[in-house]
Image (cartoon, helix red, strand yellow):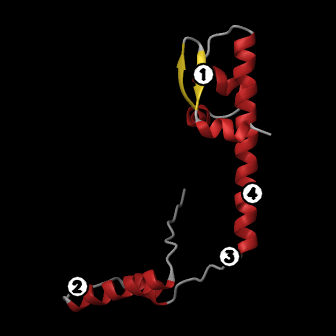
């Protein structure tokens, strides 16, 4: 599998990076030519405010869906008097245990203790 990493730099940050490279070279060090070419001809990534807001809205909707599922799973486990665990909540909510741990800080005496964000997202 091939992976690549991308730096999202502002224009000022890019200028600063180029200055650092020039100083590095002036000290007698070498920079690979393919890296230097990429730095001199960066790919410009344009994103509109509309696109950014759309992504934020989608994330917010996904969080609300997940927290609602977690709340329903907690209610179900309490109602059925089953053992409350992160894994059980995740199983009934059909979300990742990592997502459950994000909103359920602890489980004490078979009761889930949730975060403030959890209550914010589960409100209608």
- Residue 118 versus residue 46 in the image, above or below: above
Q: How packed is label 1: few (under 14 Cα within 10 Å), some, or many (20 or more)?
A: many
Relative to 4, 61 lies left or right: right
Instruction: Calculate the distance from the C-alpha at mark 4 to the C-alpha at mark 1.
Output: 28 Å
List x then y, in percent, for residue 53.
73, 65
Q: Determine which residue is flagged by label 2.
A: 29
Q: Mark 3 or mark 1: which is in front?
A: 1
Which residue corresponds to the image point at 67% horizontal and 35% vertical from the top-left?
119
List x then y, in percent, for residue 87.
60, 23
Which residue corresponds to the image point at 23% horizontal and 92% vertical from the top-left?
26
Q: Mark 4 or mark 3: which is in front?
A: 4
Residue 98 found in image quarter: top right
For the residue pair 31 and 19, the one nearer the viewer reads as 19
Q: Determine which residue is flagged by label 1.
A: 112
Q: Determine which residue is flagged by label 4.
A: 57
The label number, if any, that marks residue 38 in the structure image? none
- Residue 36 versus residue 62 in the image, above or below: below
Which residue corresponds to the image point at 60% horizontal and 21% vertical from the top-left?
112
For the residue pair 67 and 120, the one nearer the viewer reads as 120
Q: Mark 2 or mark 4: which is in front?
A: 4
List x then y, in percent, for residue 68.
75, 34
- For the residues labelled 3 and 1, say whether their Cβ atoms are less than 8 Å apart: no
Instruction: Calculate the distance from the C-alpha at mark 2 to the C-alpha at mark 4.
Output: 47 Å
Mark 3 lies on a secondary structure that is: loop
Q: How packed is label 4: few (under 14 Cα within 10 Å), some, or many (20 or more)?
A: few
Of labels 4 and 3, earlier in sequence is 3
Instruction: Calculate the distance from the C-alpha at mark 4 to the C-alpha at mark 3.
Output: 15 Å
């Amino acid at each position: 599998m091939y992976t690549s990493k991308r730096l999202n730099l502002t224009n000022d940050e890019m200028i600063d990076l180029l200055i650092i490279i020039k100083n590095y070279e002036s000290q007698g060090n070498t920079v690979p030519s393919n890296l230097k070419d990429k730095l001199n001809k960066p790919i410009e990534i344009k994103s509109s405010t509309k696109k950014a807001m759309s992504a934020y809205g989608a994330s917010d909707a996904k969080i609300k869906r997940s927290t609602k599922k977690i709340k329903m799973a907690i209610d179900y486990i309490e109602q059925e008097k089953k053992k409350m665990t992160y894994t059980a909540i995740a199983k009934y909510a059909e979300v990742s245990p990592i997502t459950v741990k994000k909103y359920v800080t602890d489980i004490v005496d078979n009761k889930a203790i949730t975060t403030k964000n959890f209550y914010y997202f589960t409100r209608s």
